[in-house]
Amino acid sequence: MNASTLPSKPAAGRDCVFAAAGLKKEYDEGQVQALRGVDFQIMQGEFVAIIGPSGCGKTTLLQMLGALDLPSTGSLYYRNESVQDLKDAAGYRARQIAFVFQSFHLLPTFTALENVQMPMLETKLGRADREDRARRLLKSVGMEHRMNHFPAKLSGGERQRVAIARSLANNAPVLLADEPTGNLDSENAQLILELLVRLHREQSMTVVMVTHDLEIAQKASRIIAMKDGRIVSDSAKP
Ligand code: ADP
Ligand code: MG
């Protein structure tokens, strides 16, 4: 069998975290083509920003990486596993992926400390260990003084800190962030960005961050620009 007849499994090497080939996603029976054939590899420890105008497919791409939705065609690998063929997509999301969203998605009737413990409820950790870990995570994002506050009593920047702490609860190696600074003023946006950069450095996390803010994107080590469901440029910093 020569190379051209091999199945479309990309040559995902030891350090390749995501490999996409010919990735397409249609909605509404093909009326919407959100991804029109996307190819890339993301390596262990990269900090990638995905930029592009509203509607170009950024969120859709992140949803594919996080196995929140399935591609229509093409292949997508996480390390050596086909994301489309995962038997336990929920387990993949829980163990491999930390998600951060623009609108935080905190549970309003639980305190910061309780929100951060939520992902740990599914694990073997006992109550005291869960709480202890949640305290340490909140401390690491500078929220030790707001542990018992409810989300409504926190500022946007503080809510995002709690959401980031929660996303780290299960020690996932990959962080996917969809417009994490989109609801924040520029000062808080900078603080959140610095926090993500620090996590990336200190914990060697692979980070894929969607943003439409070019200044925010500049902090990444690589910028993938999209337009109309395609990648139009992909450049790593020297
Ligand atoms: P971005 O995050 O870059 O703003 P999206 O990935 O959210 O873009 O959307 C890409 C395109 O797919 C848009 O045209 C959007 O309206 C469409 N789209 C996204 N999600 C859905 C859905 N669940 N059903 C139908 N169309 C969708
Ligand atoms: Mg989006």
Image: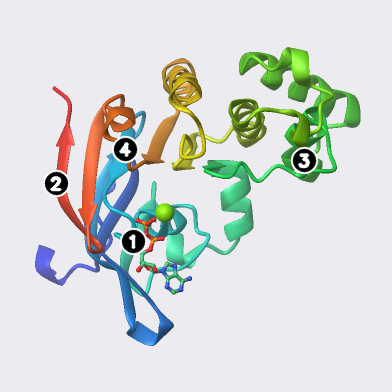
Categorize mark 1 by other alpha carbons within 10 Å: few (<14), some (14-19), many (20+): few
Identify the colour scheme used.
rainbow
Circle 2: residue type:
Ser
The residue pinned by badge 2 equals 233
Q: Say if disc 3 is inside 8 Å of ligand 2.
A: no
Contact, mark 2 vs mark 1 (Cβ under 8 Å):
no
Q: CA distance from mark 2 to mark 1?
A: 17 Å
> Against 104, is 19 above or below?
below
Tell me the quadrant of the picture where the C terminus can be found.
top left
SS under mark 1? loop
Circle 1: residue type:
Gly
* Labels 2, 1: front one: 1
Q: Nearer the viewer, residue 84 or 133?
A: 133
Q: Say if disc 1 is inside 8 Å of ligand 1.
A: yes
Q: Residue 45: image x %, image y %?
A: 36, 28
The residue pinned by badge 3 equals 118
- Left or right side of 119 for 45: left
The mark found on residue 55 in the picture is 1
> Against 225, is 48 above or below?
above
Q: CA distance from mark 2 to mark 4?
A: 12 Å
Q: Nearer the viewer, residue 123 or 225?
A: 225
| Residue depicted at x 44% and y 42% | 179
